[in-house]
Image (cartoon, grey):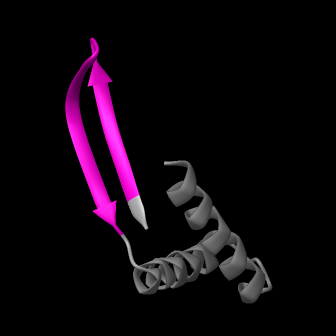
Amino acid sequence: MKLSKIILENKKIVERAELDISEHDINNLTEAITEKLQEYIDFGKPEVLLKIVKEAISELLVTN
């Protein structure tokens, strides 16, 4: 998956960035974010939180 970002100012490109992310990288990122959230939020069910975080990351990658 690729995550792309283009910033325009006055109809000119001022920044263009692209990040190529593998499924393995997404899984690692999901687990890291979930662990950090569990430190701050008493969610109770880590498997549900893991699924929520993975869906959020996947949605961001698709919409961007």
| Residue 43, x across and y down, in percent | 76, 77
Q: Does 36 sit left or right of 44 as displayed? A: left
Q: Does 4 sit left or right of 56 as displayed? A: left
**What segment carries the magenta color?**
3-20
Residue 16: within the magenta?
A: yes
Q: Quadrant of residue 24?
A: bottom left
Picture residue at 36% right of the left edge, 50% below the top: 4
Question: Main SS type for the magenta part?
Answer: strand
| Residue 1, x across and y down, in percent | 43, 68
In this view, 7 is above or below 2:
above
Residue 30: within the magenta?
A: no
Q: Does 41 sit left or right of 45 as displayed? A: left
- Pick the front one: 4 or 47: 4
Q: Does 12 sit left or right of 40 as displayed? A: left
Picture residue at 27% right of the left edge, 11% below the top: 10
| Residue 11, x across and y down, in percent | 28, 15
Q: Quadrant of residue 37?
A: bottom right
